[in-house]
């Protein structure tokens, strides 16, 4: 459970925008945490819009689907800039799988927040080599709030922050789930890293 009373905002006439980043490895529950925050805003009758890059076609085209199948309707976009046009008058903008957007997402997040919107971005903070996954580091730097969620190491059971790729592919973006990756702690990640 997360306790972030300062993140939750009240509906006031003059609202200030803010940027929140939810980051972590695969299987860490990033999308579940994003959905949890968005659903609470919805319950408070705030207008919520959710976007994701259209590259992520693993599941239904128009849903942000977390791995435990909690889903929420979302709009797939080709470019980060599309979010500016499509977010309209909403109060809260959720963006999932942020690591698949290019650098443009950074200025898009800034613009939305500066217009008074609450912007919540979820994405992988490290790639399969354990290196920072751009543009997440920049978003983490400009955000008011950063939440790092953890998976459980599939080898030893400790907390895991790394996404270990089981295949030999060196492709940076490789979509695919449980069969292609394991969540690993630092020790188990570097012990087996090729
Ligand atoms: Zn481990």
Image: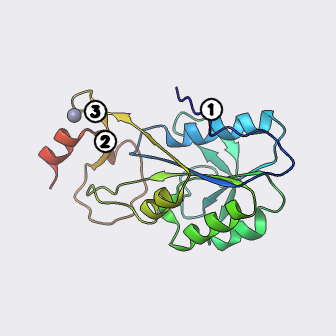
Q: Quick one: label 2 or label 1, which is nearer the N terminus?
A: 1
Residue 76, quarter of the rendered image: bottom right
Label 3 sits on a secondary structure element that is loop
| Nearer to us: label 2 or label 1 | 1
**Is the CB of mark 3 within 8 Å of ligand 1?**
yes
Tell me which corner region of the image, top left, top right, bottom left or bottom right, holds residue 171: bottom left
First in sequence, mark 3 or 1: give its number. Answer: 1
Image point (58%, 33%), residue name: 4
Q: Which mark is residue 5?
A: 1
Residue 28 higher or lower than 50, as above or below: above
Tell me residue 122's x, y (percent).
Answer: 53, 50
Queried on whether the Cβ of the residue with tag 1 lies below 8 angstroms from ligand 1, the answer reads no
Q: Is residue 73 above or below residue 10?
A: below
User: Quick check: 14 left or right of 174?
Assistant: right
Return the x and y of residue 40 as percentages of the image width and height.
72, 34
| Residue drawn at 47 percent across, 56 percent down | 140
How far apart, in angstroms, are the residues tagged by discs 2 and 3?
6 Å
Instruction: Name the residue rendered at 83%, 44% in the picture.
Output: 12
Which residue position holds label 3? Answer: 154
Q: At which x and y percent is residue 82?
A: 70, 71
User: In the figure, 108 relative to 98: above or below?
Assistant: below
Callout 2–callout 3 Cβ contact below 8 Å? yes
Return the disc, 2 or 3, that comes first in the chain's sequence. Answer: 3
Residue visible at 83% across and 52% down in the picture = 14
Name the residue that disc number 2 marks: 182
Binning the other alpha carbons within 10 Å of mark 1 as few (below 14), some (14 to 19) or many (20 upward) gives few
């Amino acid at each position: 459970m997360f306790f972030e009373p300062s993140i939750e905002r009240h509906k006031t006439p003059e609202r200030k925008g803010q940027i929140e980043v939810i980051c972590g490895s695969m299987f860490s529950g990033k999308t579940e945490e994003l959905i949890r925050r968005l659903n609470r805003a919805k319950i408070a009758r705030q207008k919520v819009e959710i976007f994701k890059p259209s590259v992520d076609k693993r599941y239904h085209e128009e849903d942000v689907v977390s791995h435990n199948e909690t889903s929420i309707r979302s709009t797939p976009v080709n470019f980060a800039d599309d979010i500016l046009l499509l977010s309209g008058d909403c109060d809260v903008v959720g963006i999932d799988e942020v690591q698949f957007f290019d650098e443009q997402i950074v200025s898009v997040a800034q613009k939305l927040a500066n217009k008074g919107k609450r912007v919540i971005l979820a994405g992988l903070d490290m790639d399969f080599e354990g290196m920072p996954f751009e543009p997440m580091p920049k978003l983490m730097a400009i955000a008011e709030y950063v939440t790092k969620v953890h998976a459980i190491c599939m080898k030893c059971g400790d907390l895991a922050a790394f996404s270990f790729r089981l295949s030999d592919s060196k492709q940076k973006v490789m979509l695919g789930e449980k069969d292609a990756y394991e969540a690993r702690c630092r020790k188990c990640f570097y012990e087996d890293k090729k």
